[in-house]
Image (cartoon, rainbow, N blue to C red):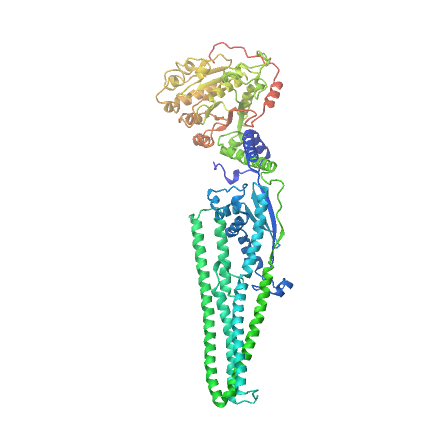
Amino acid sequence: MKGFTGPSERKELDLAECGRVLLKRKWVLLTFTAVLVALAAVLSFTRKPLYRATATLLIDEPGASLLNIQDVLNAGAYYRSDFLGTYFNTQLRLLASRSLAERVSKRLNLAARPEFRPARPEAAAGDAGAAFDILGGLSVAPIAETRLVYVSYVSPHAALAADVVNALVEEFVDFSVETRYEATKQTSEFLTEQVALLRDDLKRKEEDLQKYGQEKNLLYLSDNESAVVNNFASVNTALTTAQIERYAKESAFRELRSLSVDALPESVSNPTVQALKTQYSQVKSEYEEKGKIYRPEYPEMVQLKARLDATRDTLQEEIRKAVVAAESEYRAALKKEASLRTLLDEQRGGVARMNKNAIFYHTLRTEVENMRTLLSTLVAKQNEIQVSSQLGGLRTSNIKVVDRALVPRAPFSPNVRRNLLMALLAGLLGGLGLVFLVESMDNTVKGPEDVEKLVRLPSLGVIPFLTAEGGRKAGGVYGAYRSYGAEKDKAGELEPEVREIELINHLYPKFSIAEDYRTVRTSILFSHADSAPKTIAFTSTLPQEGKTATVSNLAVSFAQLEGKVLLVDADLRKPRLGKVFNLRNVTGLSSFLAGKGSFDEVVQKTSIDNIWTIPSGPHPPNPAELLNSKRMKDLLAEAKERFSVVLLDTPPVLAVIDPVIVASLADSTVFVVRAGRTTRRPFVRAVEEVRKSKADIIGVVFNEVRVGRRGVGTPFYHYYQYEYESEARPAAPAAPDAKP
């Protein structure tokens, strides 16, 4: 035999089988669904209503770090390929940052608002705690394929939800403006200071030039000057260029030196610093986001904190390196300027020796002209910076509020209808899964299909369940078992009075169950094509499966064919046939097998026509040895000659070896299975044990099948069968107590 779930045994989906399982386990499905729906209803009606306010932001392309007129007039002229990557994601993280939430808390003074109730006790301590509650109800959702972002906040109070969202987007715009123009303001202040100093120097030089010319009576100098003068002029020009370069380097150095990791402007041209700034912003946002959920000492938060500190240190180090590099360039420019100044002083001495007065005047004039050029350059740069600062004061930004949040009119949660529908759907789906899970865990033998699948044995018939007290009340599942002639109860309904299940086929021949036993009899007679078996052993897997009741009622069915039937109680350990037929058990099968009685001495006539029995006899010490003896074979041989059919009641297979021995001696063997109680693996093992003895197993009789519940048959089937058999069948007359 193959395994229980071999590939060859798998079947396609059977809708009828699925329907049978659902009908059988319908209460599991209904109960599971009802529990989920009830739970969803309780949660929906007891949950506090929540309101959601939403604002829409436009995050446009970022401009240059120092905004100028062209930025305003031609805002779309500079698109960066990284906009929807690092920059856009950074803005989304900043929207959900703790620092921005703290600014909102300060702006709204949430601690003073009566409708604000912090979710955590520490939130009442200040803005930092309130920020976590703001972040707990905040959601940021970018709209696909656009530059728009939905910013929403959920609160039990509608007005509070709208106020928080509007304050958040306004603070975000302010933060963007402040960050954008911080570097511009620093540069403007530096250039203003330098222009003022340069103007003072130029004024003094011009006064010196005018005074010297008046003292020396120098009106002009000829253009045809000596080589010394020309060299002096060249060095002076180079010195001016070096001074301009030094001012530029010093300006860049001062700008870098004033940088802060948390307020790094977009004007930084160093790509490494800019990349690290983006990485630091992402890690910081992730740390603040998860800080809403976990405490700082949580392992993941500790790792994120370490990563944040490492990124900050790296960024700080890169800024330091950039400052060092800028300082180095500035020092080099300063050194170059000093070198040129020294050279100029040397050239000035030579010029002085040639024409001290003229050269000195020319020198002063050149210095004045160079200082004027430098001042003009710095003033132009200062004007540009001042215009940018003025535009910054106008609050220009690439981030704009498209739609402010309105006070929501109705709560969005709980959605009672949706919750109930979802609970119903989940209950039905989960209930279906639970039904088939319970069904798959049921490892009992339920019907003929299971037997065919497990051991390749046919079904000989199905015997419905009937209690020892006598069936069910009329109108129930077993109402079809009622017989004509039974007394009526108080309600006027017929009620059967069944007291002996083992002989129900004899006592109530008009019950539909009697026809079930006749069906089993017919199946046994036609189990062989050539001739019907004469000695038939009945066994089961375990005790209490109904072998004795089945053998007794089948004996009655065989006796109704006017043939002689012999019942042999081959259960020498726990016999029951003697009690069923009310016979003395003084002598019996054990007596014959032990040589203490003849065949005629152990055969007893029952009160039912055409039925004789051999009780088990006294309990022997060695039942297996007696059953496996030559006298057992002789008894069966003589019984086959003198009776039409011989039925042997044996013990369960898994209890003792006796049924295997008897099955090997009988013509055929029938297994009795208690439907819904006999488990699969023991049943398969029992069948294999009997098959090892070369016994001929002709099929299985299903006993105590719950009609209409297990799916094997329906009450209507038995009702119509009863109507078909409604013609009164006279009971066979009692036969005299005679030997066969």
- Horizontal and vertical percent for residue 26? 56, 30
Residue 260 in percent (x, y) is at 48, 60
Q: Name the foreground residue: 303 vs 421.
A: 303
The answer to which of 676 and 417 lies nearer the viewer is 417
Q: Residue furthest left?
A: 621
Q: Residue at x 45, y 76 (%)?
A: 335
Residue reaching furthest top? Answer: 736
Question: Where residue 694 sits: x, y (%)?
Answer: 45, 30
Residue 527 visible somewhere in the drawing: no
Q: Where residue 487 sits: x, y (%)?
A: 57, 11
In the orientation shown, which residue stands out farthest toward the front? 215
Residue at the spot 48% in from the left edge and 87% down from the top edge: 352
Find residue 525 and report its image quarter: top right
On screen, 195 above or below 172?
below
Could you tell me if residue 444 is visible in this image?
yes
- Tell me how many marks there are: 0
Tell me which residue sits at (54%, 59%) in the image. 179
Please name whichever residue, 304 or 236, is drawn nearer the observer in this view of the structure: 236
